[in-house]
C-alpha cells in the first residue's frame, strides 16, 4: 500500500513516467485571469491573529463518499446518510471529515449534486451535534498519460473517487472561465504541463492568478451552499517537485522577490546532479538554488494565506505527513511556514500496515507537529490513523492517546485494489475504542501537559538550507535518533523550534537542558538568545557542529561553537551525536542527568509517558514490542496485535515528593470496564514507587486516579 510518506521519500520526485513529448506551455497565455490579480497575492497578514477554534475535535472519523453518492438526492442515498450519521453518533464520533471527490476540480461539472450531498450530510450530523469538515485537494486534476498509468490510478487511488476527463474532454475542461490546461505548472525541463507521476495528476501553479481566482470563487460557492464547520484544503505543496514551475508567473516572482532568474535545466551549478532521483536534485551550495526553494515555499504560503482570508473565521487546516527532513524541500511542503494561517493541525503519521506497530520512529514527527500546534495558540492537533480492521483502529487511537492529541480514524478499504470480502464500516472499527474512552478515561487532550525533562532543539534553517554533515547526515536524522533514545529511556521531551530558539525570555522560562545536536545553521539572533539563556544559569548539551552557517546558509568564517564554549563552557556538556552513540545513556550513567521516572523491574519495552490533566497525574503506556498479526488474505494489513513482552509486571521509581492522590488504577480497553490496582507509596526522600501489572495487555494502558 502506497502512503504519502512513502511517496515523499521515494516515488514522485524521481520524475519517472513523465511524457516528454507534450506540447510546450512555456509561452502559453494563462487564460482568463482575474482583472485584479495583484489583490489575490497581497492579502493582509493574518498570522498575528489567534487561531479560530469555535469547536475542538476529539474523536474524528472519515466520512467516505462513493461515486453513487453523486446521484443525490435519490432516496437510497439520503437514507444511507441518515444511517451512517446515527452510527457515527453511537460510535461517539464528534467530528467527521470528508473523504472522496478529493481531486475537487475533476468534479466541477457536478458541484451542484456534490454540494447538495454534502449539505445533506451536514444536516444529519448536526442533529447529533457532530461537526463536519470538508476535505479536498484544490490544485490538481487527475490525468493519467497512458494506459499503464490509467490502470495504476485505478489500482491505487480508488478512494479519491475517480471521475476525471478523458484526454479529448480535458482540452476543454474549465471552471469559471479558467481552462485547466492553461493554469497548470510548467515543467522546467521541456515546457510541458507539470505532472505528478505518483498520483497521475497535473498540477495547477500556486502563482498563477487564474488558478487563484478560480479557487477563491469555488471556496465562496462551497461556503454559500454547504454549512461545513471547518475546511481542510489538502496538498498545499508541489507534488511535481523541483521540475516545476517555469511559468511566467513563477519567473516573474523569482525576479521580483529575489532578483534572480530560473536557469536552464542544464545549469548544473544550480540544479546539481539531475541523474539522481529528484529528491537529491539541487546544489545547496549555490545561494540562488536556496532562494529558489524559498520562493516556492513563499508561493504556497501565500496561497494558504489567501484561503484563510477567503474562509474568514471558519477553521482551516491542511494535510502534513512530515515536517522535518530536507526531502520536503523538493515538494515545498513546509508546515512551519504555513502555520500562522492555520487553525487546526493534522498529523498524517500512521498507516494500516503491520509496519505501523514500529511506532517509535513516528514519535519525532508527532511531537514536532504537536509543538507547532502548541505554539500556534494551543491549536487542536489531530493524528490521522489509517486502518482496515478494528485492531488497526485501536493502534491509531492508542498512539493519539500516548501523544496527547485528538484521534482521526481513517478507514481505507478503497486504498486497496478491491474492497475486502469482510470489509468494515467506519463506525464499526472505532466504536469500541471511542466508547471505552468516554466511559472509562475521558481526558481532554488540550488540558494535558507532558512532563518535560529535556528540550530538543529543531532549527528549520538547517532544513531550509539543505545542510548535511560530512557523512551526509542531516539535522533531522539526529533529532530522530534523540527521539528514539528519549522514548527508550522514558524521558519526557518537547521541541524548541526556530523562533523560540531566538527568544531569550522564552528560553529562560524553563530550566530543563537544551539539546543542540547538529544545529549548524544559526542566526545571530538565535546565538544571542542562547548565550543569554546560558549566562542566566541555563544548561545545554552540545553535539558539534554548531553555528557553522548563518540562517541563509552562508558559511561563517569561524563557527559560533568556539565563542559559545569559550564564554559559557561551564554550562555546556559536549557530547557525541545521537546518530553515533547514546549520549543520553552516558549522561545518566555519569550522573549528569537523572530521569524523573526510572524503571526498576519488568520488561523495559513498555514506553511510559507522564502527563498531567488539570493537575491530575497519569502515566500512558504504549508497547514498543508489538507483534502484528497480518490478515490471512491481505498482505501486510493488521488484523490483530499480539505482544513479544512476557514480563509485564512493571515497577518504577518516580522522582516526586508526593503523588496528588493516594489511589491509582490501571485501565485499558483490553481490560474492558475493569481496572487493576496500582501499588504506590513513598520510598526514599523525594521518590515515589509504583508497581503495575500489564499482563494480558498488548498495546496500551493508562494509570489514572482510582
Image (tube, rainbow, N blue to C red):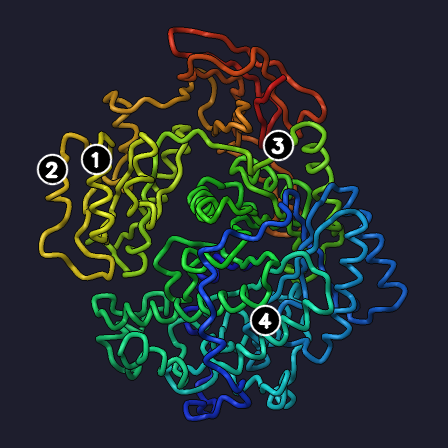
- Disc 4 residue crowd, few under 14, some 14–19, many 20+, Cα 10 Å: some
Residue at 22% across, 29% down: 537
Q: Residue 586 occupies which quadrant of the picture?
A: top left
N-terminal-most mark, 1 or 4: 4
Residue at 55% across, 17% down: 692
Question: Are circles 3 and 2 on residues that touch, CB within 8 Å?
Answer: no
Q: Is residue 613 above or below residue 496?
A: above
Which residue carries the number 1 mark?
534
Identify the image quadrant of the N terminus. bottom right
N-terminal-most mark, 3 or 2: 3
N-terminal-most mark, 1 or 3: 3
Distance between mark 1 and mark 2 Cα atoms: 9 Å
- Disc 1 residue crowd, few under 14, some 14–19, many 20+, Cα 10 Å: many
N-terminal-most mark, 2 or 4: 4
Distance between mark 3 and mark 2 Cα atoms: 46 Å
N-terminal-most mark, 4 or 3: 4
Q: Is residue 442 left or right of residue 139?
A: right
Camera-side mark, 1 or 3:
1
Residue at 71% across, 45% down: 93
N-terminal-most mark, 1 or 2: 1
Where residue 549 sits: x, y (%)? 19, 56
Q: Residue 574 occupies which quadrant of the picture?
A: top left
Where residue 139 sits: x, y (%)? 54, 73
Camera-side mark, 2 or 4:
2
Residue at 65% across, 31% down: 442
In the image shown, does 212 or 44 lie closer to the viewer?
44
Indicate which disc residue 443 carries.
Answer: 3
Which residue carries the number 2 mark?
567
- Disc 2 residue crowd, few under 14, some 14–19, many 20+, Cα 10 Å: few
Q: Secondary structure at mark 1?
A: helix
Question: Are circles 1 and 2 on residues that touch, CB within 8 Å?
Answer: yes
Amino acid at each position: 500500500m502506497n502512503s504519502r510518506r512513502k511517496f515523499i521519500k521515494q516515488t514522485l520526485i524521481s520524475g519517472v513516467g513523465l511524457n516528454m513529448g507534450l506540447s510546450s506551455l512555456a509561452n502559453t497565455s494563462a487564460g482568463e485571469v482575474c482583472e485584479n490579480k495583484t489583490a489575490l497575492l497581497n492579502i493582509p497578514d493574518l498570522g498575528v491573529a489567534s487561531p479560530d477554534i469555535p469547536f475542538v475535535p476529539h474523536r474524528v472519523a472519515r466520512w467516505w463518499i462513493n461515486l453513487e453518492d453523486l446521484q443525490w438526492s435519490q432516496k437510497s442515498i439520503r437514507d444511507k446518510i441518515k444511517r451512517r450519521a446515527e452510527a457515527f453518533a453511537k460510535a461517539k464520533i464528534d467530528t467527521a471529515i470528508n473523504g472522496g471527490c478529493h481531486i475537487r476540480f475533476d468534479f466541477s461539472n457536478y458541484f451542484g449534486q456534490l454540494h447538495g450531498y454534502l449539505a445533506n450530510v451536514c444536516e444529519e450530523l448536526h442533529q447529533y451535534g457532530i461537526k463536519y469538515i470538508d476535505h479536498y485537494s484544490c490544485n490538481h486534476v487527475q490525468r493519467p498519460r497512458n494506459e499503464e498509468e490509467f490502470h495504476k490510478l485505478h489500482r491505487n487511488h480508488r478512494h479519491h473517487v475517480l471521475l476525471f476527463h478523458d484526454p479529448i474532454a480535458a482540452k476543454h475542461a474549465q471552471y469559471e472561465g479558467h481552462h485547466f490546461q492553461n493554469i497548470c505548472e510548467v515543467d522546467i525541463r521541456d515546457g510541458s504541463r507539470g505532472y505528478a507521476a505518483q498520483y497521475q495528476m497535473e498540477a495547477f501553479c500556486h502563482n498563477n492568478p487564474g488558478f487563484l481566482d478560480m479557487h477563491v470563487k469555488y471556496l465562496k460557492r462551497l461556503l454559500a451552499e454547504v454549512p461545513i464547520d471547518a475546511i481542510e484544503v489538502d496538498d498545499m505543496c508541489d507534488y511535481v517537485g523541483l521540475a516545476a514551475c517555469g511559468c511566467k508567473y513563477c519567473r516573474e516572482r523569482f525576479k521580483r522577490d529575489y532578483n534572480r532568474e530560473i536557469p536552464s535545466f542544464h545549469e548544473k551549478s544550480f540544479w546539481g546532479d539531475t541523474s539522481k532521483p529528484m529528491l537529491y536534485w539541487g546544489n545547496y551550495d549555490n545561494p540562488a538554488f536556496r532562494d529558489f526553494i524559498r520562493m516556492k515555499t513563499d508561493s504556497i504560503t501565500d496561497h494558504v494565506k489567501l484561503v484563510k482570508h477567503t474562509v474568514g473565521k471558519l477553521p482551516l487546516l491542511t494535510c502534513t505527513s512530515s515536517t522535518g527532513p530536507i526531502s520536503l524541500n523538493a515538494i515545498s511542503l513546509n508546515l512551519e511556514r504555513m502555520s500562522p494561517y492555520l487553525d487546526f493541525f493534522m498529523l498524517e503519521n500512521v498507516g494500516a500496515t503491520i509496519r505501523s506497530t514500529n511506532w517509535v520512529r513516528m514519535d519525532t514527527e508527532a511531537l514536532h507537529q504537536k509543538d507547532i500546534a502548541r505554539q500556534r495558540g494551543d491549536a487542536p492537533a489531530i493524528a490521522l490513523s489509517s486502518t482496515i480492521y478494528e485492531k488497526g483502529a485501536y493502534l491509531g487511537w492508542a498512539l493519539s492517546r500516548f501523544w496527547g492529541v485528538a484521534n482521526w480514524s481513517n478507514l481505507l478499504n478503497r486504498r486497496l485494489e478491491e474492497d475486502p470480502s469482510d470489509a468494515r464500516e467506519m463506525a464499526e472499527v472505532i466504536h469500541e475504542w471511542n466508547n471505552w474512552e468516554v466511559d472509562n478515561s475521558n481526558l481532554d487532550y488540550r488540558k494535558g501537559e507532558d512532563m518535560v525533562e529535556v528540550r530538543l532543539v529543531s532549527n528549520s534553517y538547517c532544513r531550509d538550507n539543505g545542510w548535511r554533515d560530512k557523512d551526509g547526515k542531516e539535522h533531522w536524522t539526529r533529532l530522530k535518533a534523540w527521539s528514539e533514545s528519549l522514548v527508550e529511556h522514558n524521558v519526557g521531551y518537547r521541541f524548541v523550534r526556530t523562533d523560540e530558539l531566538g527568544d531569550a525570555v522564552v528560553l529562560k522560562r524553563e530550566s530543563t537542558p537544551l539539546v543542540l545536536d547538529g544545529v549548524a545553521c544559526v542566526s545571530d539572533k538565535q546565538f544571542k538568545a542562547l548565550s543569554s539563556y546560558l549566562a542566566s544559569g541555563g544548561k545545554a548539551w552540545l553535539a558539534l557542529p554548531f553555528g557553522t552557517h548563518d540562517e541563509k546558509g552562508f558559511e561563517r568564517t569561524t563557527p559560533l561553537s568556539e565563542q559559545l564554549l569559550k564564554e559559557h563552557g561551564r554550562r555546556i556538556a559536549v557530547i557525541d551525536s545521537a546518530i553515533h552513540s547514546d549520549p543520553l545513556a552516558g549522561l545518566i550513567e555519569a550522573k549528569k542527568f537523572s530521569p524523573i521516572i526510572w524503571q526498576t523491574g519488568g520488561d523495559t519495552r513498555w514506553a511510559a509517558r507522564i502527563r498531567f490533566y488539570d493537575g491530575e497525574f497519569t502515566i500512558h503506556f504504549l508497547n514498543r514490542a508489538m507483534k502484528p498479526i497480518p490478515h490471512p488474505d491481505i498482505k501486510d494489513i493488521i488484523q490483530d496485535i499480539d505482544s513479544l513482552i512476557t514480563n509485564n509486571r512493571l515497577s518504577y521509581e518516580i522522582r516526586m515528593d508526593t503523588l496528588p492522590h493516594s489511589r491509582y488504577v490501571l485501565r485499558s480497553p483490553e481490560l474492558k470496564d475493569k481496572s487493576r490496582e496500582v501499588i504506590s507509596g513513598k520510598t526514599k526522600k523525594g521518590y515515589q514507587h509504583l508497581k503495575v501489572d500489564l499482563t494480558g495487555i498488548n498495546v496500551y494502558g493508562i494509570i489514572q486516579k482510582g
